Structure formats: structure tokens, C-alpha cells
Image (spheres, rainbow, N blue to C red):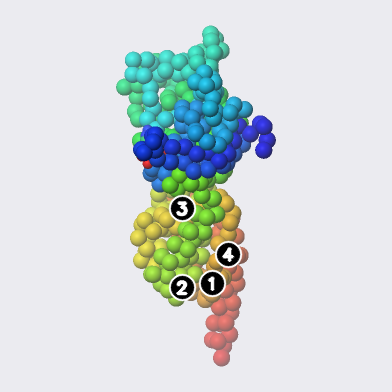
Amino acid sequence: MDATTPIQLEDVCYSYGKGALKKQILFDITTQIESGQVVILTGPSGSGKTTLLTLIGALRSAQRGSVRVLGHELLNASERSLIKARRQIGYIFQSHNLLDSLTIHQNVQMATKLANLRGQEAKQRISSVLERVGLGEHEHKYPRELSGGQKQRAGIARALVSRPQVILADEPTASLDKQSGRDVVELIQDLAREDGSAVILVTHDNRILDIADRILHLEDGHMKSIGEVVSEGTSRMLNLLEKHDPQTANYLATFSFALARIAYADGIVHDSERDEMRRILHEVAQLQSSEVDFIMELSMMLKRTRSGVDERLNKPALDERRAEHFLDSMYAIARADGKVTGEEVEEIDEIAAEFNLFEEIHNSKKDGESHDEH
Ligand SMILES: Nc1ncnc2c1ncn2[C@@H]1O[C@H](COP(=O)(O)OP(=O)(O)O)[C@@H](O)[C@H]1O
Ligand SMILES: [Mg+2]
């Protein structure tokens, strides 16, 4: 384990309550997060995400294991050392937590004071971070004068103004619409990359999984490897597709994964692409929207982990009709957002090569022609 690794957790256990009311929430959590990494923490509601984040953020103390953040051991640390550690961490809360009686500038200024930044330097940092989050013109307004998205961005500015090496964000997009949610997350990602910070972002939002360098998954307080999640997910998906079309479940799995790959070939899944995918998979296998979303989520995780499902899926048999439909469907997804990008074309070519789509179509055409001559 490298001493410069900003976040190191080892066998972390946490319980709320005492005596008969004691309830263990986190079980033997071990992981580490490097500088410049954006890690997304997912898991069902109540699985312990916020609790884990507050342990790393020095807002509470674990009872067992080791929580090392920026070189400080937080287990059994004194309140004073916890406060000290807290000042080096940028914490973005689910709600913005701004003080209503202070302007946006003053709210951000509080964070610079805690970080011992004063005078001209502090002033410049505040202006530049507010500029960066798109609030340059609103510096002297009060929180009530801003929209939800703007307030959330002010919260981000406050957390990031001191350029913390560790950034913790607890569902920062929960109260935002889709586009502002995406913007906020990309902003955190950009700022983190610039400063080489380690980021943990808790989210329920499957649409932003693709920005993560790594995905951690909590279930009932246990960290599950993404491999386990993907493996369970793959079985679930195959069962799902078998229910709809047992003969071709294997083909459908391959086909749906391919469509999902096209949908996020350029890094963003637009709603129009998602809708097109829902339309096609409904037509082919009567899948419901939520089932299509599940496939989308699963294939994003697969892409992240690069763990192919190839071992589980046999190469499907494709006749000409299917090959053509496969290719057409991929183009339909690529076209859905109004433009076909280079990345999408590349991805289509790659998939077409993997499944010999062009040859299949070409050969069938040839067969057809030679039959005609007879
Ligand atoms: N202050 C608390 N006291 C007692 N139990 C709590 C407290 N906060 C959270 N819990 C419980 O701990 C579990 C995990 O909660 P939390 O970490 O907030 O999960 P998540 O953020 O994944 O939704 C839940 O069962 C929740 O009810
Ligand atoms: Mg939570």
C-alpha cells in the first residue's frame, strides 16, 4: 500500500447505537482510492453509502479497522485531529447547505477562512472558482435568488475553493434535473482532474456511471466487487431475455449489449438514444423500459470493468436478415440524437467486425445471386 494514496480503508466496521439497540451497518470495508481517480459509490438506499462517506469525511469515527485519509489515521482520533482532517476534505452534501443570510461570495469565503486562506489570494480563488462553476455574475446574490442547480454549484464551489485533495460528494445530483445533474458531475470531474484530487461520488443515477474510473458497490453494508455485481446481473439479464424469447436469448443479449455500446459510444447516453433503444428492444423482445434501463446499466458496468460476458455468451448465429437488422438497429441508435459521430461509427464498425456482420450480409447476397442464375 502506497503511503501517498489519499484514501485507504481496511476492514472498516461501523455500528449505530449501543447495547441491545446496536446495529452494524458496515462490514469489513477494504478499498483504496488514488489521486486523480473518480470513484462512484452505488448501492440501494440504506446500504450504508452515506455512513461510509461520513467516516472518510471525518464526520464520525469507525469502531474497527483503519480509515487513513491524507496520511491521518481517523480511527480513534481525537476530536481535534478529526477537525483538522475535515478541513482538508471537500464535502459536497446532498442539499447545498448554504447559509441564507450570506451572499454566495461570503458562503464560499467561509471555506477559505477555514483553510487559512486570506486577503487577495482568497479573494482571487473565490472569484475564479465561482467563475469556473458558472456563477461569476451571481457572486453577490443570496442563495434565495438562485435556482436549485445554481445553489448546488455554489455548494461545489465552497467545497472545492481550497483545492482539497479529497472530494466527497453525497448524491450531488439528487435535487437536479437530468441535464444540470450531468453538468454538475462533469464539473466535479473536471475540477478534480485539474487538481489531481481523489473523488468519491455517491449516486443513484445510472446515467452518470460512465464518468467513473471505478465503481464501488455496497449492498447491506458489504462491499461487493463489480465482478460479482456484473456476474449476477448477467445471469439476471439472460433469465429476463429467456422469459421473452427462449430460443434467441443468447442472440438478444449480444444484440442489446451492442446497442448499449453504440448509445454511449460518445460518452453520453442522450434521452433520444435511450428512447430508440427502448423502442427497438420492445419491438424485438417486448422488453419494458425498466428492463432496457437495466441492460443499459449492466453494459456500462461491463464497459467500465472490461469484463466481457463472452465466456457466458456463445457467438450467436446470424443469418442475413438478422445481420441486416443488427446493423440497421445500431445505426438507428447512433442517429437518434440527430447526428452520427465518429466514435459511434467506430464502435459500429468494431461490433460489425466482431460478429462478421458485413460478411454475413455480403455472402447471403452472393448466395442469392448465384441461386438466381440457376
Ligand atoms: N444516525 C443514525 N442512527 C441510526 N441509524 C442510522 C443513522 N443513520 C443511518 N442509519 C441507518 O444506517 C443504514 C445505512 O444508512 P445510510 O448510510 O444513510 O445509507 P445510504 O446512504 O446508502 O442510503 C440505514 O439502515 C439507516 O437507517
Ligand atoms: Mg445516503
Q: If you read the primary sequence from the N terminus, does the residue marked by circle 2 or circle 3 appear first? A: 2
Instruction: Using the numbered discs, state the Cα–Cα distance from disc 1 to disc 3 in whole angstroms.
Output: 22 Å
- Relative image position of residue 155 (x, y in whole percent): 43, 26
Q: If you read the primary sequence from the N terminus, does the residue marked by circle 4 or circle 3 appear first? A: 3
- Relative image position of residue 162 (x, y in whole percent): 54, 21
Q: Nearer the viewer, mark 4 or mark 2?
A: 4
Q: Is residue 93 left or right of residue 69?
A: left
User: Where is mark 3, residue-wise?
Assistant: 297
Q: In front here: 224 or 195?
A: 224
Q: Is residue 191 left or right of residue 280?
A: right
Residue in view at x 52 percent, y 76 percent: 319
Image height of 217 relative to 335, above or below: above
User: Where is mark 4, residue-wise?
Assistant: 310
Q: Is residue 108 visible?
A: yes
Residue in view at x 56 percent, y 91 percent: 374
Instruction: Using the numbered discs, state the Cα–Cα distance from disc 2 to disc 1 in whole angstroms.
Output: 8 Å
Image height of 59 relative to 232, above or below: above
- Relative image position of residue 219 (x, y in whole percent): 45, 48
Q: What numbered label is drawn on residue 248?
A: 2
Q: Amino acid at mark 3?
A: Glu
Q: Secondary structure at mark 4?
A: loop
Residue in view at x 55 percent, y 41 percent: 11
User: Where is mark 1, residue-wise?
Assistant: 316
Image height of 154 relative to 224, above or below: above
Q: If you read the primary sequence from the N terminus, does the residue marked by circle 4 or circle 1 appear first? A: 4
Q: If you read the primary sequence from the N terminus, does the residue marked by circle 1 or circle 3 appear first? A: 3
Residue in view at x 54 percent, y 72 percent: 316
